[in-house]
Image (cartoon, rainbow, N blue to C red):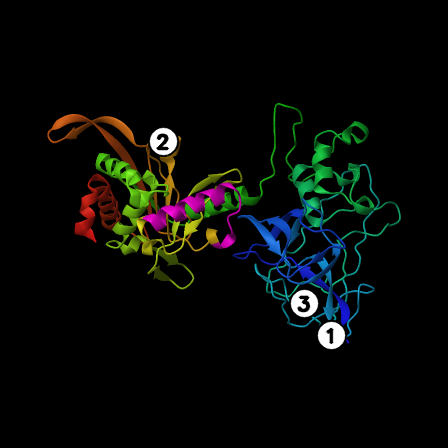
C-alpha cells in the first residue's frame, strides 16, 4: 500500500560549478499542492535569475530558507510530502537517507547524500562576550554539486547552523551567509535584533541596522580588531552596495582574462555608407517585414562570414592539456547591459543562421537579458563576442576578452563625417571597429586580415559574393 513520505530538495548547481544562489522569492507556501516541474521559486545566481521547477509532485511541508538568503549548493531548501511505496516515514519524522540516488530536476542535481553514518559535528562553544568585539566566525566550507557533503550537512533534518545557549551568553542566531555579510560590513551581530523565525537574524536585519534601525539603542557596531572590515559611513554622502551576483562574477572574469590572456587590440575606421543604405533597403523590403534589423545585425553577419577565412579567431587556449581547441561552430556572444550588470549571452550555432534567423535570435537575446531572465546555458559556451559600444555614442575602445574566447569585436557609433570618396571629399557614414584578440592564439597577421575582411564587407556588402 502506498504511504506518504518526506522528500527534501537540495539546491542544485545551476550551471558551471556555481557554489551558491540567493532565494529571491517563493512561488509556493507550506501546505500547497504542487505538480512535477511546477515553478516553486525564483533564485539568482552569479549569472542569471532562474525559475526553479519542482522535482516532485506532492505537498509542501517546509520552506527551509527565507527570501533574500544566499544558499550554498547542496543545502536543503524545501521539503515535500509525496506518495511512496516503500513504507517510509511521513511528515512525522525526518526524511530517509538515500544512497547515490538523484531525483530528476530540470535545472541540475543536488549533492549526493551519503549513508555512511558519520557522527554529527560536535556543537561549538563560545566564550562569554566581553567589552572587546568578538572574532569573526570562520567561513563554512562550500558544498559542490556532485560531491559528498560534509558531516554537518549529511542527513536530511539538520537545521540552519545556530549555537545552543551557553553559560555567560548566547551566540546570535543567523545563517553563515548572513554572518559573512555582517563581517564584511563590520556589523556586530550581538547588536542586531533578529526578526526571523525564533529571532533569527536575516540579511534585511543587518542592512536595516546599517540604516540606523537598531543603532539608536545599541550604538554603531565597531569592526572586529584585525578583521579587515571596511568602516561604513552612514548618511547621504556615501552609499555602499555589497559586491555579489553578476557584478561579482564579471569582476572576477575580467581580472582573470586581463591577467591571463595577452591582449592585443587593432582598430579600423571604414566608410559604412553602402551597409547603411543596404540596411534601409532591407527594412523596407517585404521579405524582411516584421524583423528588427539594426547595424549590429549586419556587423554580426559580416563577422560570421569573415570567420570562415580566419578560423583561429574562433578557438580557445586549453592550459590544462596544453592544446589549442578549434571550434567548428560559432556561439556568438553579445555583450548586453542589463539592470543586473553586464552579461554576455550567446547565440548557439550562429554561423548556420540566415540573416532573418540571426535578427530574430538577437532580438530575443536582448529582450531576455534586459528582463533578467537569461539562463545559465545561454551565458556559457560562447566562442567569440561582439560589444556594441556605439549605442552609447562611443567611437572606439579596447574591449577585454570574454574568458575562454580568442577575440571580441567592438563596433563604434556610425557618424556622418567628411571622407574621401571617389577622389573627392564627401559627407559619408563612418564607423570604427576595435578588435581585441588573444595573442597566444592569434598572430597579428591573422587578426589584421580578419578585421580587414569585416571592414571590406561593411564597406561594400557586394564583396560577400566573392568571399563566400
The stretch in magenta equals: 356-377
Residue at image location 22% in from the left, 46% down from the top: 453
Check disc 2: other Cα within 10 Å, few if <14, some if 14-19, many if 20+. Answer: some
- N-terminal of the pair, mark 3 or mark 2, is 3
Q: SS for tag 2?
A: loop
Residue 13: x %, y % from top left: 58, 58
Q: SS for tag 3?
A: loop
Residue 124: x %, y % from top left: 79, 55
Picture quarter containing residue 68? top right
- N-terminal of the pair, mark 2 or mark 1, is 1
Check disc 3: other Cα within 10 Å, few if <14, some if 14-19, many if 20+. Answer: many
Q: Main secondary structure of the magenta part?
A: helix
Examine the rendered structure and indicate whether residue 218 appears above or below residue 95.
Answer: above
Q: Is residue 320 visible?
A: yes
In front: 204, or 282? 282
Q: In this view, does 125 lie to the left or right of 385?
A: right
Q: Nearer the viewer, mark 3 or mark 1?
A: 1
Residue 154: assigned label: none
Marks 2 & 1, CB-CB < 8 Å contact: no
Q: In this view, does 195 lie to the left or right of 459?
A: right
Locate the N terminus by quadrant: bottom right
Q: Residue furthest right?
A: 167
Q: Is residue 171 visible?
A: no
Q: Residue furthest front?
A: 286
Residue 113: assigned label: 3
Check disc 1: other Cα within 10 Å, few if <14, some if 14-19, many if 20+. Answer: few
Residue under pointer 1:
85
Q: How far apart are marks 3 and 2 (CA)?
A: 53 Å
Residue at image location 39% in from the left, 43% down from the top: 400
Residue 394: assigned label: 2
In front: 66, or 85? 85
Residue 306: x %, y % from top left: 25, 50
Amino acid at each position: 500500500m502506498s504511504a506518504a513520505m518526506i522528500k527534501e530538495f537540495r539546491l542544485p548547481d545551476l550551471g558551471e560549478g556555481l557554489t551558491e544562489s540567493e532565494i529571491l522569492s517563493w512561488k509556493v507556501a507550506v501546505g500547497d499542492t504542487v505538480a512535477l516541474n511546477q515553478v516553486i521559486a525564483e533564485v539568482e545566481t552569479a549569472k542569471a535569475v532562474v525559475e526553479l521547477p519542482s522535482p516532485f509532485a506532492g505537498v509542501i511541508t517546509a520552506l527551509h530558507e527565507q527570501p533574500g538568503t544566499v544558499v550554498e549548493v547542496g543545502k536543503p531548501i524545501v521539503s515535500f510530502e509525496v506518495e511512496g511505496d516503500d513504507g517510509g516515514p511521513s511528515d512525522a519524522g525526518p526524511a530517509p537517507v538515500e544512497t547515490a540516488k538523484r531525483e530528476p530536476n530540470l535545472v541540475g542535481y543536488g549533492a549526493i547524500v551519503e549513508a555512511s553514518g558519520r557522527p554529527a559535528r560536535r556543537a561549538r562553544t563560545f566564550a562569554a562576550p566581553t567589552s572587546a568585539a568578538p572574532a569573526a566566525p570562520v567561513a563554512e566550507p562550500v558544498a559542490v554539486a556532485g560531491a559528498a557533503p560534509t558531516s554537518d550537512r549529511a542527513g536530511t533534518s539538520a537545521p540552519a547552523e545556530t549555537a545552543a545557549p551557553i553559560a555567560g551568553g548566547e551566540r546570535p542566531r543567523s545563517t553563515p551567509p548572513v554572518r559573512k555579510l555582517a563581517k564584511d560590513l563590520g556589523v556586530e551581530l550581538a547588536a542586531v535584533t533578529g526578526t526571523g523565525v525564533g529571532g533569527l537574524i536575516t540579511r534585511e536585519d543587518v542592512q536595516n541596522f546599517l540604516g540606523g534601525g537598531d543603532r539608536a539603542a545599541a550604538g554603531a557596531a565597531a569592526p572586529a580588531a584585525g578583521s579587515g572590515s571596511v568602516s561604513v559611513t552612514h548618511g547621504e554622502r556615501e552609499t555602499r552596495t555589497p559586491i555579489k551576483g553578476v557584478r561579482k562574477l564579471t569582476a572576477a572574469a575580467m581580472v582573470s582574462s586581463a591577467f591571463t590572456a595577452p591582449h592585443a587590440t587593432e582598430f579600423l575606421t571604414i566608410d559604412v555608407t553602402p551597409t547603411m543604405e543596404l540596411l534601409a533597403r532591407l527594412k523596407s523590403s517585404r521579405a524582411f517585414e516584421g524583423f528588427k534589423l539594426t547595424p549590429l545585425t549586419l556587423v554580426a553577419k559580416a563577422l560570421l562570414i569573415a570567420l570562415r577565412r580566419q578560423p583561429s579567431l574562433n578557438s580557445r587556449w586549453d592550459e590544462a592539456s596544453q592544446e589549442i581547441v578549434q571550434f567548428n561552430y560559432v556561439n556568438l556572444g553579445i555583450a548586453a547591459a542589463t539592470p543586473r550588470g553586464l552579461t554576455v549571452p550567446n547565440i548557439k550555432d550562429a554561423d548556420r543562421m540566415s540573416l532573418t534567423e540571426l535578427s530574430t535570435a538577437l532580438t530575443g537575446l536582448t529582450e531576455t537579458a534586459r528582463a533578467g531572465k537569461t539562463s545559465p546555458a545561454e551565458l556559457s559556451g560562447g566562442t567569440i563576442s561582439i560589444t556594441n559600444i556605439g549605442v552609447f555614442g562611443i567611437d572606439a575602445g579596447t574591449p577585454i576578452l570574454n574568458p575562454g574566447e580568442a577575440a571580441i569585436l567592438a563596433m563604434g557609433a556610425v557618424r556622418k563625417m567628411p571622407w574621401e570618396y571617389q577622389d573627392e571629399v564627401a559627407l559619408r557614414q563612418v564607423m570604427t571597429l576595435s578588435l581585441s584578440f588573444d595573442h597566444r592564439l592569434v598572430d597579428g597577421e591573422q587578426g589584421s586580415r580578419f578585421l580587414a575582411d569585416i571592414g571590406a564587407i561593411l564597406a561594400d556588402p557586394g564583396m560577400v559574393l566573392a568571399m563566400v
